[in-house]
């Protein structure tokens, strides 16, 4: 048996796109043959190999050719050119409700899908209880699937795909339709399949899933391979490219408006924050800051008269509404400002905010008196550099090597199954 479950060489898939089409036989006769549309290559000269028992991820923007690639590998599309060899029984979960007949019940569709996969009636019946338990849709299993919600469709489809002992499992990003509990259940089961040696091909927009679960990954762009290799490296390169494109988009558009709205300002107004400027680790203005990297937030101000005992403050609110942090210059004391314009830098050695968009508030105060307060008037875009942790901020620290206190006997397989069941 080959060490590769899937081997593709110069794989290409072309579609013809027509601006109009005949909707009836009469139109075809009267109007004649329509001009041939223009060609669109959804996949072009892709060569890659997927090792047996590995997990392979496909990433890229919408329209990059990920789903087309998966359908070619699953045998739904025939390639326009090139070759693909798939060595193993394939179970695929590609589109919501694909392979289901709306007028059949859930139980009947299980048998239908099993027959499509080449399984006998006895094999499907043997797996029936397992499928029903995993799907968890109760009495709806004996009702026509055309009345199912999208979440119920995904539950049943995924349960069928993973419970019929697939040798190769292909999953497009339809699991995201399910609720949080079911998503966790799916990913736990994918992890178990991976440990049992099932080859998994996964299309996803979740770079965290690519890093955590995949061994190799392929980044597609406009139907062509942009990068192929270890999942961590591909995910990092893809994320860096997205960050760079976002920076360029801000530069082309002139960036977001950085001046605060005077009509919304609170405070007596002797001194005001006029704008915020975000600088990267090299001190260059950048509309996007990188998590974990050094940066500076420059607060431009104008003082209309002399003021003393001034403290500058800045607040960060996550896009979800959570108040993340609110540092101020009071730790360094207070300042006196002469009339005129200037700026104060808030220097950050390592930005601990996780990737997200943050609403930024600014304030200038003097021992309880407010000169200026701009509530959530600025936007800060933080993007990742790879290896991101969950949560709103990072927690610096190191883990020491494990210290064994007591020695335990190895856990048996049956005991481990009982613990999982509990």
Image (cartoon, rainbow, N blue to C red):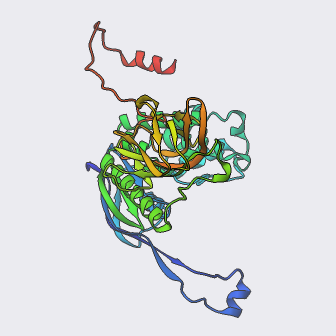
Q: How many marks do you count on the picture?
A: 0
Q: Which residue is drawn at 46% across and 39% down?
A: 336
Q: Can residue 321 be seen here?
A: no
The percent position of residue 54, horizontal first and vertical second, equals: 33, 44
- On screen, 145 above or below 37? above
User: In terms of depth relative to the viewer, which is nearer, 211 or 280?
Assistant: 280
Where residue 294 sits, quadrant-wise, is top left
Nearer-the-camera pick, 358 or 402: 358
Along the viewing direction, whichever of 116 and 338 lies nearer the viewer = 338
Could you tell whether 240 is left or right of 402 in the image? right
Which residue occupies 46% across, 59% down? 61
The foreground one among 369 and 95 is: 369
How far from the left and from the top, in percent, is residue 48?
A: 30, 59
Q: Position of residue 120 (x, y in %)?
A: 51, 44
Regarding residue 419, the answer to whether it shows in the image is yes
Picture coordinates of residue 42, whole percent (x, y): 45, 69
């Amino acid at each position: 048996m080959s060490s590769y479950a899937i081997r593709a060489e110069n794989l290409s898939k072309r579609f013809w796109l027509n601006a109009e089409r005949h909707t009836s036989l009469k139109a075809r006769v009267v109007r004649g043959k329509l001009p041939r549309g223009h060609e669109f290559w959804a996949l072009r000269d892709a060569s890659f190999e997927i090792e047996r028992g590995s997990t392979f991820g496909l990433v890229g923007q919408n329209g990059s050719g990920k789903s087309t690639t998966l359908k070619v590998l699953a045998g739904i599309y025939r390639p326009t050119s090139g070759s693909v060899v798939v060595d193993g029984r394939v179970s695929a979960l590609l589109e919501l409700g694909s392979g289901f007949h709306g007028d059949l019940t859930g139980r009947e569709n299980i048998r239908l899908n099993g027959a499509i996969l080449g399984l006998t009636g006895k094999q499907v019946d043997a797996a029936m209880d397992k499928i029903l338990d995993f799907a968890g849709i109760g009495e709806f299993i004996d009702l026509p699937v055309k009345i199912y919600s999208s979440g119920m469709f995904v539950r049943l489809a995924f349960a069928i795909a993973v419970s019929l002992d697939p040798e190769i499992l292909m999953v497009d990003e339809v699991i995201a339709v399910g609720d949080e509990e079911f998503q966790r259940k799916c990913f736990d089961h994918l992890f178990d399949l991976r440990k049992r040696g099932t080859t998994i091909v996964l299309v996803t927009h979740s770079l965290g899933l690519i890093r955590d679960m995949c061994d190799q990954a392929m980044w597609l762009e406009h139907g062509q391979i942009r990068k192929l290799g270890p999942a961590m490296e591909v995910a990092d390169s893809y994320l860096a490219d997205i960050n760079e494109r976002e920076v360029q988009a801000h530069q082309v558009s002139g960036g977001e408006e950085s001046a605060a709205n005077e009509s919304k300002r609170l405070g007596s107004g002797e001194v005001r924050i006029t704008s915020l400027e975000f600088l990267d680790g090299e001190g260059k203005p950048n509309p996007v800051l990188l998590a974990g990297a050094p940066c500076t937030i420059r607060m431009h101000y104008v003082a209309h008269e002399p003021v003393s005992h001034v403290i500058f403050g800045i607040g960060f609110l996550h896009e979800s509404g959570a108040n993340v942090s609110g540092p101020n210059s009071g730790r360094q004391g207070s300042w006196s400002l002469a009339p005129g314009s200037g700026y104060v830098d808030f220097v950050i050695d390592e930005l601990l905010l996780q990737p997200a968009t943050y609403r930024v508030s600014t304030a200038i105060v003097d021992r309880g008196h407010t000169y200026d307060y701009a509530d959530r008037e600025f936007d800060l875009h933080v993007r990742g550099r790879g290896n991101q942790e969950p949560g709103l901020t990072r927690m610096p620290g190191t883990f020491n090597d494990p210290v064994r206190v007591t020695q335990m006997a190895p856990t048996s397989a049956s005991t481990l199954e009982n613990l999982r069941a509990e």
